[in-house]
Every structure is written in structure tokens, then in C-alpha cells.
Amino acid sequence: MSVIEIKNLTKNYGKARGVNNVSLNVEQGEIFGFIGPNGAGKSTTIRTLLGLIHPTSGSASIFGKSCSESPEVRKEVGYLPSEVFYYDNMRVIDLLKYSASFYKKDCTQRINELAEAMDLDLKKKIDDLSFGNKKKVGIVQGLLHEPKLIILDEPTSGLDPLMQQKFFELIGEENKKGATVFFSSHILGEVQKMCSRVAFIKDGKIIKLEKMSTLQENNYKRISIEGKAAINKEYFNLSGISNLEIKGNVAEFIYKGNINSVLKKISEIELRNISIEEPDLEEIFMHYYTKED
Amino acid sequence: MNMYLYELKSLRKSTIIWTCAMISLAVLYFSIYPSFVNDAEDVKKLLGGYPAQVRVALGISLDNITSIMGFYTMVFSIITLCGAIQAMIFGTSILSKEARERTADFLLVKPVSRPAIVSAKLLASVTMLLATNVIYYIAVSILISIVKTSDYSVKQFFLINLSLFFLQLMFLAIGLLVSVFFKKLKSVLPISLGTVFGFYIIGVLLATGKEDGVRFISPFKYFDIPYIIKNSSYEVSYLITGTMIVIVAIAASYIIYTKKDIHAVS
């Protein structure tokens, strides 16, 4: 059984926003990345999954159950929203205890561990915390009951790089202990480091769902060449080439396909220089992103 | 249970303030009662100078204004106004505050159903209203025993004050129903004050006419104090209507809130 199962999920808000026919599965123990620009439908998908929003059609379930029909499955879910807001007049520890009281187990030790790891002062009033510190409260709050599924919606905004690293370590540890992680972001680098599979969403539709390893290794090459003479634009009219940029003697593009065919093509040019690199996820993403336009 | 306790705590301060305000008002009024009785004739002459409509609107009845019950009728009309505002604010704010303070993403992803959340919040509000009523009743019983010049019916006095609780339940339910229709209700105070004063003024205007049917429009007219004093009971048709309003409004709130989409903060 998949931990997360989204089937033909559609949610319309009037005209523009929402999601359209989204389907995806997240398996036990995975770290799943959910990538897309702002407004693509990431939050809508996550909120439907959590039962905050009701789908127009299709279904979204966690551990085989829909959150709005059986809210108790949320016991196994830890959620960190992109922007955290809590009851201002409470102290951090009171909020965390209130949060823990929903899960019917003793989380005191876990709270202390997490607070120490995140360098969070439990005695402060939430009102007095900076944005970054509030975010830390959110992280502790999301993890204190040792959930089997961790859902993160743009988790790193507002955290300084050091804390981001700490945060990813924490998530990594949870994952090693068996937690499944569903992770939305528009920052591609952070997904690249962690995720085993990744789905791209744009304008409410999933445009690609692939294994991270396939994405990175499978045929995607960033190639730049410098010819002895000016390179004709028409010359690289080859399938599999995208993001082609030609400036005089220099041509740059991303290639996906049989390496031999592109090398043959290149070998016909008198070269001054060549580099072939692994593209980072951002470029692969932009590749999908622009192709759709 | 944890939600109920949390909500109780968050309502504590405002409950104390409202209770104190209502008791202070009663103290203020009762403090002038002794001089009222001493100069009974002058007072009657003075009040007799007012137009009859104004007297009715203020709950003043010339025949028994100097009797303790008649005097309390006048006091009570102000107290009900306070109580109604308190209840309406509780009703409109208790669910909507999660969206307003942007804490919905915290509470609504906990392993509890939406109906359970509504129940906890509703129960906490009712508890606090009950506490307000009990404390107010005790205070006002003490006051009346201090200033009374003749005996009065404890049963009538109890029934009059109990009607405050019923009125509050009605406004709590109305407030709750109003609040679930808003995506994000920011103006709890204007809506509450507007609704309560609106019904109050309608009630005052209705009081000057004597038609029975139109009294159904304003909850303030469901419990007619002179009727309670005369009969030591409530009017059944209004009691039933009031109960229906509470049940329907609360049931509708449950259904709408459960089906509602909770949108991201922006």
C-alpha cells in the first residue's frame, strides 16, 4: 500500500488556480520531492491531502484513508506549513505541549531533543520570536510525535543556511528511522540533495514524475562548444536538444537522447573547446518548464 | 478534552471582563434604588412626563417602577443587551479566530474531526456563558437582598435572570452561523455589535406596538418580563421558537464548517 495516493485529483477555484487531474503515489520510506513554481498547485495538493480542502473530483488519501473522512489518520502525519503562525500569547513549551496532547503519547523528551537540536528557547513567548524561530517551532511541532509521514510545504524559507542544514539532517534521520517524506519546494537544489523521486507540477498539472537518479543520469547533458567559426543556428536542429543558445562561435544546450548522435553532429564542426556536464536539476526543470510554453 | 480546556482558557479573560461589567451595571442601578423608593411620587411624576413609547422602550412601567421587580425590569433590559453582545462575540469569534489568527493550519491538521473541533469550542463558550450567568445571578441576588424594601418572588427573579442565558444561547448560535459563511472574518466586533443593536432596536420599536406575532422578529422580545412577573412562567411558543433557532443555527454551522475549504494564509 502506498503511503500517499492521489488519484485524478481536481480542484477548481473559479478560473485560474487549482489543480487538474493530478495523480501520484508515494511509497513507504521514500523522500518525494514536489517541485513547481509558486502558484502551480503545490499547496492546493498538500492541503487536499491533509483534508483542509475538499477535492472537486478525484481523491487524495494517506495510508489508504481520506483525511476528511477519517481524521485519525492524521495521527501519523507531521505537517510543516510554508508560513507558520501560532497562538501568540502562548509560550513555546505550552504550544508544543498543546500540540502533543492531540497525539496521546508522552512527547516531552522528544520536544527537548528537538529543541536542543534546533537551538530553540522553549520558555519564550511565541509573540517575541523572529520569523526564523517561529519556523523552528513549526519544525519541532511537526516532528514531536514521531510521525510516519512528514509533509513539508516549502520548509526552508526563513531558515538560515546553517539551520537549513540542521533541518535536512533531522529529516534525513527521521527518514532513516522509516518515515516517509513528502516535500514541496520551488528551490530545486534542496530537493536534489534529498529526494529519491520527484514530480514537477505546473499550472495545476503534473508534467513529469521521475526517479531522481533517472533525472540526473539519464542522458541529460549540458553541452557547450566553441567553434572555430560562427555556428549556424540551423545546425543543431536535432531532436533532444533544448535551451539552445548560440552567441557567435559559442553554443550551449541541454541534450537528452543518444549521446552518439549528438557527438557525431558535433564532430563535424571544427572545435576550439568543448565541455559536457551533468546539468543540475534547475536546468532540467527549466527544460520542462519552457518546453510547455 | 484538551481543546475544550484550551478554549476555556482563551475565553477566560473576556468572560471575567463581561461578568464584571454586567455586575457593575447592576450595582450602579441598584445604588439609586433606595432614593427611588423614597421619592416614589416624584419619580413617577418625572417618568410620567416621558412619552409612553419611550417608557415602554426602556422597560419602565409606571405602575410598578418603584417595586423591586418593576425596577429590575428596567435594569435587566440593559443587562440583556450586554449579555447578547458577549454571546454574539463568542459565537462569531470562536471558530473564525483560527482563520483570522492563521492558526487553522495548526489545529485542523491534528487528528481530530471538524465536528469535534466545533463541539469543543461550542461547549467551552456555553460553559463560559453559564459561568457568567451563575456569577451574575449570585451577585444580583445579594444586591437585591440588600436594597429590597419588600419581599419578592424568588422564582420570578430566577426566571427573569434565566432568560438571559437563553437569550445568550440564541445569539451564540446566530454568531456561530454568521461566522462560518466567511472565508476569513476580520470584523468580529462590528458584525456582533451591529447585529445585536439591530435586534435590540427592532425590539424597542416592536415594544411600542402591541402586536404579538411581530415579536418573533427580535430575540430580545422572546422573554417578556412583565409576562414572567405576572405568570411566573415563560411563553411556550416563544420558548419553542427560540430553541428551534438555536438548534437549526448550530446544526447548520456544524455542516457548513465541516464542508468548508480552509485556504492557505496570504
Image (spheres, grey):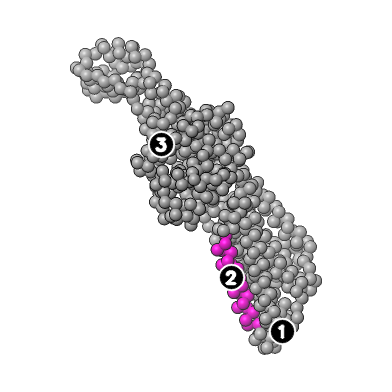
Same chain? Circles 1 and 2: yes
Quarter the N terminus of chain A occupies: top right
Give the residue at the far front of this rendering: A109
Residue drawn 33% across and 11% down?
A260
Q: Chain of mark 1?
A: B
Q: Amino acid at mark 3?
A: Glu
Q: CA distance from mark 1 to mark 3?
A: 78 Å
Same chain? Circles 1 and 3: no
Query: How would you rate the neighbour count of disc 2 (Cα within 10 Å): few for under 14, some for 14-19, many for 20 or more?
Result: some
Q: Amino acid at mark 2?
A: Cys
Checking the image for residue B20, the label placed there is: 2
Residue drawn 67% across and 81% down?
B146
In front here: B127 or A283? B127
Query: How would you rate the neighbour count of disc 3 (Cα within 10 Å): few for under 14, some for 14-19, many for 20 or more?
Result: few
The correct choice, above or below, for A212 with respect to B226 in the image is above
Position of residue A167 measured from the top left corner of the image (x, y, whole percent): 41, 39
Left or right, B8 with respect to A292, comes to right
Residue B196 part of the magenta-drawn span: no
